[in-house]
Amino acid sequence: MIVQAEELYRFYRSGDEETRALRGVSLDVAAGEVVLVSGPSGSGKSTLLACLGGLDDPDGGIVRVDGHRISHRPEAERAALRARLVGVLFQSGNLIEHLTVAANVDLAQRLAGRRDRRLRDELLDGLGLAGRARAWPSELSGGEAARAGLAVALANRPALLLADEPTGELDQHTEGPVLRLIRRQAGERTAVVIASHSPAVRRLADRILELKDGRAT
Ligand SMILES: Nc1ncnc2c1ncn2[C@@H]1O[C@H](COP(=O)(O)OP(=O)(O)OP(=O)(O)O)[C@@H](O)[C@H]1O
């Protein structure tokens, strides 16, 4: 198992208001498996992904990634584990605008304390971006930008790939190739968790976790 999440709780408090974003959600994901997290807006999908990847810390419950406990640790330790074990792909904002595509991947590697030019070039090549390595993010098409974001997310060969609406800004023609690449990455023994409303992602998934009001239904 790459992901082992047990009984996750996450509450947000503001004055007398309390939002119960997660109320006892458990999830295991094996290497090579693609899990879709689905549910209405506000059901807790993004919060769950953030807790799985150590971007956020649950108030209760425990998260292990590739055997390492990532929850309930000082932020610096969580960040170090995250850089090594987790790749994150968002709808947009995966690329730093003033760095070329290749330099964006290099930066993701440096943040994990490594430098592997060969892996970088392999990734860009495999994602059909070999000719765009020196391009600036602003010069990329939507599909290219999504693939470059994926290259950044995969820069350190993560055990876990998290994707929050990764194809939200793409049309059907550009969505297909990105999803096929994500599926291929799962084939390399990566666990993949995707939050999405897209029917194409639903077809791709091996398993679906439906959330409603912070609970699995
Ligand atoms: N930082 C925060 N502070 C306060 N409340 C928050 C915070 N983040 C999320 N919430 C609340 O927690 C609940 C779950 O939010 P979350 O973003 O996880 O839902 P979601 O299913 O991803 O929604 P969407 O599909 O709209 O992205 C919502 O009620 C939201 O308003």
Image (tube, rainbow, N blue to C red):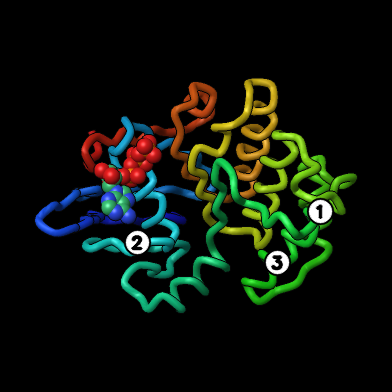
Above or below for 208 versus 2: above
For this view, does 25 lie left or right of residue 179? left
Q: Is residue 83 left or right of residue 103?
A: left
Mark 3 lies on residue: 107
**Amino acid marked by disc 2:** Val
* Percent x, y of residue 53: 44, 58
Residue located at (34% from left, 50% from top): 47
Give the crowd class for mark 1: few <14, some 14-19, many >=20 residues within 10 Å: some
Instruction: From the image, tell me which residue sits under label 1.
Output: 122
Figure quadrant of the N terminus: bottom left
What residue is shown with label 2?
Answer: 63
Disc 1: residue Cβ within 8 A of ligand 1's nearest atom:
no
Packing grade of label 3 (10 A; few <14, some 14-19, many >=20) is some
Whole-percent x, y for residue 51 in the image: 36, 57
The disc label shown at residue 185, or none: none
Labels 1, 3: front one? 3
On the image, the x and y values in percent for residue 143 come to 71, 34
Marks 1/3: CA–CA distance: 16 Å
The answer to whether residue 26 of the structure is visible from this angle is no
Q: Is residue 35 depicted above or below 203 in this figure?
A: below
The one nearer the camera, 190 or 197, is 197
Q: Residue furthest right?
A: 131
Residue in the foreground of this view, choosing between 106 and 184: 106
**The quarter of the displayed image where residue 83 is located:** bottom right
Residue drawn at x 51%, y 23% as measured from the top left: 203
Q: Quadrant of residue 217?
A: top left
SS assignment at label 3: helix
Callout 3, which amino acid?
Leu
Q: Residue at x 41, y 75 (%)?
A: 75
